[in-house]
Image: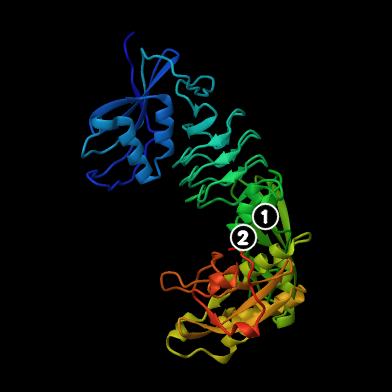
């Protein structure tokens, strides 16, 4: 039978390897298909090396781990491994090859496999659908399985899936939401890295994906119906916010019923103008979705109410409440960095008023304001006076499950690239023991509760 080869770029990788005598590399796994059978190859420069289906799967899964990949290639190739090479690749299909058991899922009318599956592991998705339903037999989504797919907008995972590997959806620029079942118990860090338009996960409450979303500030829904992220927005005069439609793959336009109270851009950015109420309407695919905005006068008491109403949900545990408030400060308050550099920090930045009303503060402003919110939630909280790197510093201790823990909201809202505009929650100093905090902080231990629990270290 005459061989026919067609190159598919499903497995194409692009990265540099620097180790010993290896100069630079980009890995190509190649699959040759004849009738109903497959063979696998990798290419190091112009040299072709045949590997088994199992070796092919391992090489593919190691594509993001430089040293393990090189080590495994050395094991597989032995003396055949060249000193200097570039690995380049894609998958090649052809003829006259023995069977090795790979099962490509192939839609009707297509000659190229849409899903490349090894056993029950999805190695790559090569299709162009905007909504992708992964086959029922898949238990693992492999590293880089959807890499650089610019067509996919939504992915629905079956109940059979248990594991999602590192960077599985890497750089899927138009991915909007993923349905992740409760069966998924292992979620690798950064599995949605580079997914800039991701709005939400669809996942059950208390699932692994729900916990991952909470830690990474990703909204969630429990079903796939289109719905506003918030049906009520609580703001103070002068505040800005943004609402979105979850699970929405269409263009959305917003408008306000009372522009004197709150304005909203077509993209959902809200500006609170004066005390009162307004209804915001989002239109997508001819359907309308509403959200009520309640705007209060700017006072510390109203701010405390606003933080609790907008961040704390019914049924939250004490841990979840503390984390939600911690994240509100990071998303909404800026460190008074520029005036601090010149020694011109105003008195208000050292007070709760700075964090709560001006939304600009230094460490003691953050810590005093955080303590006030904890008091409103009836969570025991202390203000700690100490230092860090020889400079006076203030932070908090909170009581959770009968144990005391350190929490430094200021340090979890770092200056990034010489800018105070960070809104990403960090947890480096969130619910830490004294054994962790003493590495960077100093305080008079006899004046404060002991923080010996290492539960959240």
| Residue 241, position as x, y percentages in the image | 62, 66
State the residue in front, 71 or 279: 71
Assign a secondary structure to mark 1. Answer: strand
**Crowdedness near tag 1: few (<14), some (14–19) or many (≥20) residues, C-alpha within 10 Å:** many
State the residue in front, 173 or 415: 415
| Residue 220, position as x, y percentages in the image | 66, 51
Task: Tell me the distance, in whole angstroms, between the alpha carbons under discs 1 and 2.
Answer: 8 Å
Q: Where is 402 relative to 187, above or below?
A: below
**Crowdedness near tag 2: few (<14), some (14–19) or many (≥20) residues, C-alpha within 10 Å:** many
Q: Is residue 429 left or right of residue 13?
A: right
Badge number at residue 191: none
Residue 434 visible in the current orientation: yes
State the residue in front, 169 or 120: 120
Assign a secondary structure to mark 2. Answer: loop
Question: Across the whole image, how many numbered discs are drawn on residues?
Answer: 2
- Whether residues under marks 1 and 2 lie with C-beta atoms below 8 angstroms apart, the answer is yes
Q: Quadrant of residue 163?
A: top right
Q: Where is 243 relative to 101, above or below?
A: below
Question: Residue at the spot x=55%, y=71% of the render?
Answer: 435
Q: Is residue 376 left or right of residue 338?
A: right
Residue 357 visible in the current orientation: no
Badge number at residue 282: 1
| Residue 406, position as x, y percentages in the image | 61, 73
Question: Residue at the spot x=52%, y=50% of the render?
Answer: 189
Q: Where is 302 relative to 293, above or below?
A: below
Which quadrant of the rendered structure holds the C terminus? bottom right
| Residue with the mark numbered 2 | 268
Q: Quadrant of residue 179?
A: top right
Q: Quadrant of residue 364?
A: bottom right
Question: Residue at the spot x=58%, y=87% of the render?
Answer: 350
């Amino acid at each position: 039978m005459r061989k026919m080869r067609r190159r598919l770029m499903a497995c194409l990788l692009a990265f540099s390897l620097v180790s010993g005598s290896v100069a630079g590399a980009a890995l190509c796994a190649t699959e040759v298909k004849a009738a109903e059978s497959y063979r696998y190859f990798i290419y190091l420069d112009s040299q072709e090396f045949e590997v088994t289906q199992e070796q092919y799967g391992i090489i593919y899964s190691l594509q993001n781990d430089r040293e393990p990949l090189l080590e495994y290639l050395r094991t597989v190739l032995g003396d055949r491994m060249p000193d200097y090479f570039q690995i380049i690749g894609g998958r090649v299909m052809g003829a006259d090859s023995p069977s090795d058991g790979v099962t490509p899922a192939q839609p009707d009318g297509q000659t190229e496999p849409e899903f490349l599956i090894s056993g029950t592991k999805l190695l790559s998705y090569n299709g162009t659908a905007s909504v992708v339903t992964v086959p029922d037999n898949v238990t693992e989504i492999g590293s880089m399985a959807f890499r650089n797919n610019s067509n996919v907008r939504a992915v629905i995972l079956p109940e059979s899936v248990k594991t999602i590997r590192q960077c599985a959806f890497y750089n899927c620029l138009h991915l909007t939401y993923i349905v992740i079942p409760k069966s998924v118990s292992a979620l690798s860090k950064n599995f949605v890295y580079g997914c800039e338009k991701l709005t939400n996960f669809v996942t059950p409450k208390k699932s692994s994906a729900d916990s991952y979303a909470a830690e990474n500030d990703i909204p969630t829904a429990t079903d796939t119906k289109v719905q506003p992220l918030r049906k009520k927005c609580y703001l103070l005069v002068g505040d800005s916010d943004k609402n979105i439609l979850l699970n929405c793959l269409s263009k959305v336009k917003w408008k306000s019923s009372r522009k004197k109270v709150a304005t909203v851009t077509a993209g959902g950015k809200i500006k609170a103008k004066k005390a009162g109420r307004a209804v915001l309407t989002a239109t997508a695919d001819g359907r309308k979705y509403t959200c009520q905005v309640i705007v209060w006068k700017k006072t510390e008491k109203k701010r405390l109410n606003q933080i609790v109403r907008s961040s704390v949900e019914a049924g939250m545990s004490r841990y979840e409440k503390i984390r939600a408030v911690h994240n509100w400060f990071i998303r909404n308050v800026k460190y008074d960095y520029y005036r601090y550099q010149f020694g011109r920090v105003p008195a208000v930045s050292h007070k709760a008023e700075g964090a709560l009303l001006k939304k600009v503060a230094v460490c003691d402003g953050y810590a005093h304001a955080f303590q006030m919110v904890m008091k409103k939630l009836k969570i025991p909280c202390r203000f700690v006076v100490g230092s860090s790197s020889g400079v006076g510093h203030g932070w908090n201790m909170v009581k959770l499950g009968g144990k005391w823990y350190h929490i430094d909201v200021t340090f979890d809202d770092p200056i990034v690239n010489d800018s105070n505009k960070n809104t990403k929650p960090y947890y480096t100093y969130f619910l830490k023991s004294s054994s962790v905090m003493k590495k960077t902080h100093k305080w008079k231990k006899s004046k404060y509760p002991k923080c010996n629990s290492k539960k959240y270290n």
